Amino acid sequence: MKTPLTVTLGITSLLLTLGSSPAHAVSTILRPNSVTSNLTVIEGFSLDNLINQSGLSRSYTSGVTPWSEVNTITATSREVRRNTWAGQLTSQSRRLTFDLGRRRGIQGLALWNVNTNDSINQFELYADNDNDFNNGGTTRLGMNGNFTFSAPVRTDTTLSVDTFSFTATETRYVHLNILSNHGTAEIVATSEIAFRTPLEFGHLPGIIFAVSLGYIHYFRNKRGGKDK
Ligand SMILES: [Ca+2]
């Protein structure tokens, strides 16, 4: 009987594959590789401060630390040069572009804001497979018809994180389009930004691999006329 053996092999492969990659079995915090902006940086408040974990109460390991721990991480300081990014609001378009390094699955965003009126308020997110916002091919990210996100004003000195969810998407670049801050005329600022990886993108390659192994085994047996 070849069918039971094929099924057994398929299930065994599936369990081995899933079992051998526990790091992918949970949703994790993902650090972007780099970030750029069309806004002029306020001297000293560098863009890198957005993704270098500066000012966070504890560090996370990108792609490893479970997303469930994101609420335990706070931004420990106020808007200071070594921890936060600040840009001039002189342009009509106000955009941060994150490069994830390669196509990655994402389904959420963590934003540690600043506790001043410079802080980001409303924003939109776009997935894009090149780093050009204006040449089409972008997908607006959101969920249940909501595509505009809003970050509340923070008054605490220990800044807790705000998290935002959207439909799981695979992309390399994410554009964060800043629609408003909390009232300052000339400056927008925030402390740190990271993404959330979804569960299903971690599992998908393993499942495809396991199912393929089962089929290869089945057809080899069939062609060879073997009946193990
Ligand atoms: Ca920071």
Image (cartoon, helix red, strand yellow):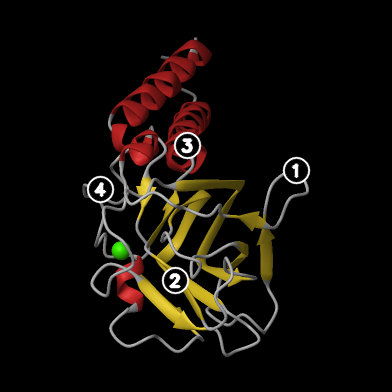
Q: Residues within 10 Å of mark 4 (few under 14, many from 20)?
A: some
Residue at numbered disc 1: 144
Q: CA distance from mark 1 to mark 2?
A: 28 Å
Mark on residue 189?
Answer: 2
Cβ–Cβ under 8 Å for marks 4 and 3: no
- Mark 3 falls on what kind of element? helix
Residue at numbered disc 3: 199
**Residue at (51%, 86%) from the top-left corner?**
38
Lower sequence index among marks 2 and 4:
4
**Residue at (28%, 83%) from the top-left corner?**
44
Q: Residues within 10 Å of mark 1 (few under 14, many from 20)?
A: few
Q: Which of the two marks, 1 or 2, is nearer to us in this view?
A: 2
Cβ–Cβ under 8 Å for marks 2 and 4: no
Q: Residues within 10 Å of mark 3 (few under 14, many from 20)?
A: some
Q: CA distance from mark 1 to mark 4?
A: 30 Å
Lower sequence index among marks 1 and 2:
1
